[in-house]
Every structure is written in C-alpha cells, then in structure tokens.
Amino acid sequence: MQAQLRARVRHPVGFWFVFWGELAERACYYGMRTLLALYITSQLGFSDSDAATVIQIFMASCYALPLVGGYIADRWLGRYPTIIFFSFPYIFGQVALGFAGSPWMLYASLGLLAMGAGAIKPNVSPMMARMYQEQGKEALMDKAFSYFYVAINVGGFVTSYALPWVRDKAGYQVALMLPAALMTGALIVFAAGRRFYPQESAASRAAARTQGGPGQASMTPEERVRLMRMLLGFPMILVFWMAYDQTATTWVFFARDYIDLNLWPFGVDLTPDQMQAVNPLMIILLTPIFNAVWGWVDRRRGVLTPARTKVFVGFGITALSIAIMAVAGGLASKEHPVSIWFMLTSNVLLGFGELCISMIGLQWAYMEAPARLKSSITAVFYLTIFAGDMVGGLYVQLYDRLSPFAYFGGQVAALLAAGAIFYAVALRRQRAAA
C-alpha cells in the first residue's frame, strides 16, 4: 500500500530529463540575451534605440515561430523529433553570433536562434504534461509546472549573472560560446530521456492533417466555448510582454545611465546587464511564496482560484512594478543616479506579476486547449509574447525622445488599460458562465 502511494506522488522519470534539458536550453537563451544589448551597441555600433528595436524584434520572432513549431509537431514530426531537429539551428546560430562582424551576420545568427528557440518552445511543456496524463498523475501537474518554471529561471539566473563576468574577463566571443555549449548539453539531455517520453501516434497526426486545421466542426461545443473564452483573454497579455521584455533592453540602458549600481549595504558592484539576473532570481525565491499565497486564498474561498483571476491580478502588480521605474526615472539624472534598490524593488513585484501571467497563462493554455491542439494553442499563447515584443520594438524608439518618467509612465497607463479590458472580456464572462 505504501509503495503504491509513493508511486502516485512520485514524478515521472521523464520529467527530470525535461527539467534539466529545459534548464540548460533556457540558460543558453537568457545568457545570450543578457549580453546582446551591450554587445550590439559596443561592438557593432548600434544606437541604444536601434539596438533595442533589433532585440525586441528578435524576441518577437522567438515567440512567433512557436506557431510553426507547434504545427509541425501536431501534424508531422511529433513533439520529441521537433525538439531534436530544431536544436541544431539553435546551436549553429549561437556559434555564429559569437563571430558576427557585421549587421547582416548579426541578423542571420539571430534568425537561426529564433528558429531553434521558437520551434522547441511549444513542444516541451505539452510533452511534459502528457506524461502526467498517461500515468494518471494529473494531481501532480501544478507542481510540475511550478518546477518547470523554476528550471527556466535557474538557468536564466545563473547565466545572466555569470556571463557578464566572463565577458569582462575573456571577451564577448568566449562568453557567447558558453551558451552554445549549454544548448549542446540540452540536446544531449533531451535525447537521453527519449524512452521515458509519451509515445506519439503517427495515425493521430495523419488524422490532424486530413482535418485541415482547427475548424469548429472538429471540436465539441464545450471545447469551442473554452477555446473562445481563452482566446478573448489572450490579446491583452501582449501589453504585459511589451513592458516585461524591456528588461533586456531599455532597463539595461536605464541601469547604465541612471542607477547607482553599488548594492548597498553589501558593497557589491553590478554591471548594467547583470541586473537581468535579478528577475529570474526573484522567480526562484518567490515561486514557493506565490504557491503558498494562492493556496491560502483558495482555502479561504473554499474553491480553486480561476487562472483568469490570477492573470488579472498580475496586471495590477506589473503596473505597480513599472510605476516604481517611472518614479526612479523622475528622480534620477545622469549626474545624480538613484539607488539600485528602486530597480530591485521593481524586480520583486515584476516577478510576482510574471508568475501570475506567464506561468499561470502557460498552464491555462495547455489545460483548456482541445486535446489534438495542445502544442498549437500553446504556440498561440506564445504569440502574445510575439505581439508584445513587436509593439515593444516600436515603443522603444521613444526611449531616446522621452524622459524616463514619461517613458515608463506610458507603460503603466497601457498596463492599467489592458487589465481593465481583460476584466471586461474574460472575468465577467467567467462569472457569467459560473
């Protein structure tokens, strides 16, 4: 009896291959992204706003291509082969980035990176979730998604903090080769776990091809209702990503010009791009607190808090985070920078906002999607990041033209408006259906 109980509460073996593979892949991606802003401006001569636009478009591409990766996996290759196949352009693009000597080499390497990261992204979490469903361990899925998100942020934290230090000691080329090594390691780990992953049916993929796409006739009425409610809420999430992903661009430039980077009272000096390590560290530290807070809320209410409610709360918390950046921008000047604690406090709140919107949103996309469209709908969720980064790519052009207070204040206004619209189209509908 005890052995059966332990088996029910034990995570599938395949989960740990996914966990470590995802950790290494995200360490590669975020480590490279940490270096990118200062690499483009200092080595290739881009202006701050132009570099920010290039990076925002690159990040947008990483979240547009999941639609292609999800389509290929659902209809042709399957999730595991798609992950393995697209790992190779990912590695090649990372190597090429280290030798980029011109804008066109930069664009080509970023294109390969976007192809690899984008195609892999919509397939890892559905492959993981399927393991739990096949083994009757759905009750462990919430914890699995939490651990999965921790893996992402452990990888992001380690390389976001370490690679600027490597860059300062050994140069950009050496620093950019380390993410290539990490992605090679991720490929090896993903491949090593193959026998523990769910078996995918070629017949089901062939059936999906003959159905001609996610038409309404192929879905039950309940699936159509769930899908429509989810898709009504998705567009507002792009505003969150428009603000959030600027931590890799304008936040770096703001830290360089307006922040005293001495971590008082600890006497540690950080580089502007090392500030990107703060957010994943906050996610690691805040995830158990986040789960405990919502667990307490659920017990008080006597019912599980719907995902849409958590997303709505995330809009308010994120707006408060960016408001602190606006205040810092209003107080600072290049001659008189403000304390690093403004950005640290903002990062703590941004971490809570990210957990509400990104982690919960990812699980929401998987759980409410029709069974044969899990990867495709996960990819649609990632399209909100694509859209947010494309909007951000336009918005960052204002960074050199507005004061920091006005620049970040505009983001606060956009987040509040998006939260209000999300409430109107998602939460009110949710309550009406309850």
Image (cartoon, rainbow, N blue to C red):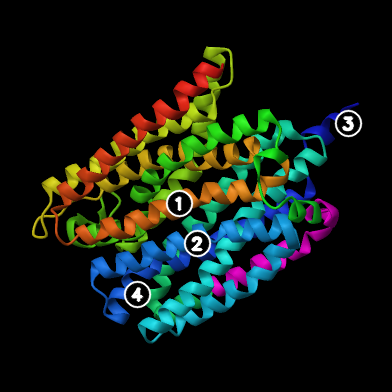
**Magenta region, residue range:** 179-205
The percent position of residue 354, horizontal first and vertical second, equals 44, 42
Asked if one can make out residue 370 in the rendered structure from this viewpoint, the answer is no
Q: Earlier in the sequence, mark 1 or mark 4?
A: 4
Q: Find out whether residue 195 is within the magenta segment.
A: yes
For marks 4 and 3, give the CA distance. Answer: 54 Å
Q: Which numbered mark, 2 or 3, is in the foreground of this view?
A: 2
Q: Please tell me whether mark 4 or mark 3 is closer to you in this view.
A: 4
* Mark 2, residue position: 62
Contact flag, marks 2 and 1 (Cβ < 8 Å): yes
Q: Which residue carries the number 4 mark?
A: 39
Q: Amino acid at mark 3?
A: Gln
Left or right, 99 with reference to 268 = right
Q: Is residue 100 magenta?
A: no
Q: Are marks 2 and 4 in contact (CB under 8 Å)?
A: no
Instruction: Count residues near mark 4 (Cα–Cα under 10 Å), then give few for <14, some for 14-19, many for 20+.
Output: some
- Circle 2 packing at 10 Å, graded few (<14), some (14-19), many (20+), is many
Q: Nearer the viewer, mark 2 or mark 4?
A: 2
- Nearer to us of marks 1 and 3 is 1
